[in-house]
Image: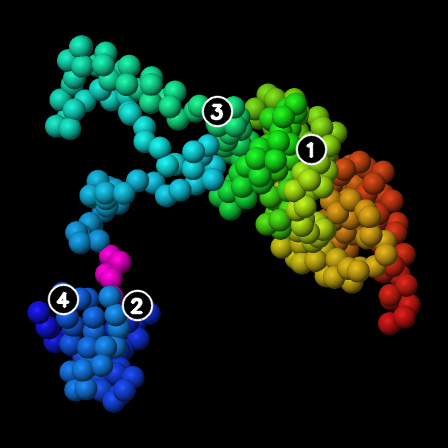
Amino acid sequence: MWAKVPEARGPGGEQLKCPVCGSTDIIFDEETGNYVCRRCGAVVMERYIDQGPEWRAFTPEERERRGRTGAPLSPTLHDQGLTTVIDHRDRDALGKRLSPRRRFEVQKLRKWQMRSRIQTGMERNLSIAMNELEKMAAALNLPKPIKDEAAVIYRKAVEKGLVRGRSINSVVAAVIYIASRIHKQPKTLDEISKEIKEKLGENIEKKEIARCYRLLIKELDLKVPIADPSYYIPRIGQALRLRGDIIEEAMKIMKKIKGNPITAGKDPAGIAAAVIYIAVMRKGERRTQKEIAQVAGVTEVTVRNRYKEIMKVLNSIGERD
């Protein structure tokens, strides 16, 4: 069956045009799904598939109710969301409550279904680890891309046998640290350890996270970018509730010292804290080194030492100018 298509358009919204004769008189063959030029008969587009649903929904609830597919695959689920789950509502397809005998049968089916989802040691490990990852990500306010990246790295570690004999929580904290650096939203080891302890009550030592981090980097050959101190400035400034002009001044100072030897091998959070301290003094805001150090997760001595080094560089730049 052929149908005239007024101003036929492709997947990108562009108007279809015959590549042979240049005509825009296009007809659609519903049996083959082809767009054909009416003038010369050339096939303009083959097997075009309508990606939209064949039903309409006017609210999110209607869209969810009428959808016939499940949730998308996710690396943060131990089975990546491929298996089904028998819910606990104990109702049939019409919404009626099941009889006691049928509920007992469904309960047995539910138990065996849960056992079939987790059969090997690797699956049990992933099930526990993904739950821990979800809890830690919520405690650290991590976005979805970082959670997904951390889950992918953890799966690689499990497949290579790097988790065996080590604390699951420590490895999960390490992959979170790696993923946050990859996505340029770094968190310090102190910050991760402290927030997990405060919000989840789990005591994960900074040294243990660092040990797992070094192991994963070495064995998985991960390319983790060096943490840029400028990434820490907005976060520290927000925690201190600093004005926008102070944050802007700190970023300008950071650009002046970027690439200088004094930043090599130094804790980026310490450098960011010192830069913010300089910007605060220049803008006449009252903030102590101790206060900034606590927010940045470094010691007051670190802020003081980085401050002295940065001031020497800024003074030398000023003398040359």
Residue at 52% from the left image edge and 24% from the top image edge: 121
State yes or no: discs 4 and 3 in contact (Cβ < 8 Å): no
Would you name the residue on which mark 1 appears?
A: 212
Q: Relative to 281, say whether 303 is above or below.
A: above
* Segment colored magenta: 48-52
Circle 4: element type: loop
Q: CA distance from mark 4 to mark 3?
A: 49 Å
Would you name the residue on which mark 4 appears?
A: 30
Of mark 3 and mark 2, the one earlier in the sequence is 2
Q: Relative to 315, say whether 263 is above or below.
A: above
Residue placed most toward the observer, 141 or 236: 141
Amino acid carrying mark 1 in the image: Cys
Q: As drawn, is 212 to the left or to the right of 108?
A: right
Q: CA distance from mark 2 to mark 4?
A: 17 Å
One can see residue 280 in this view: no
Residue placed most toward the observer, 118 or 255: 118
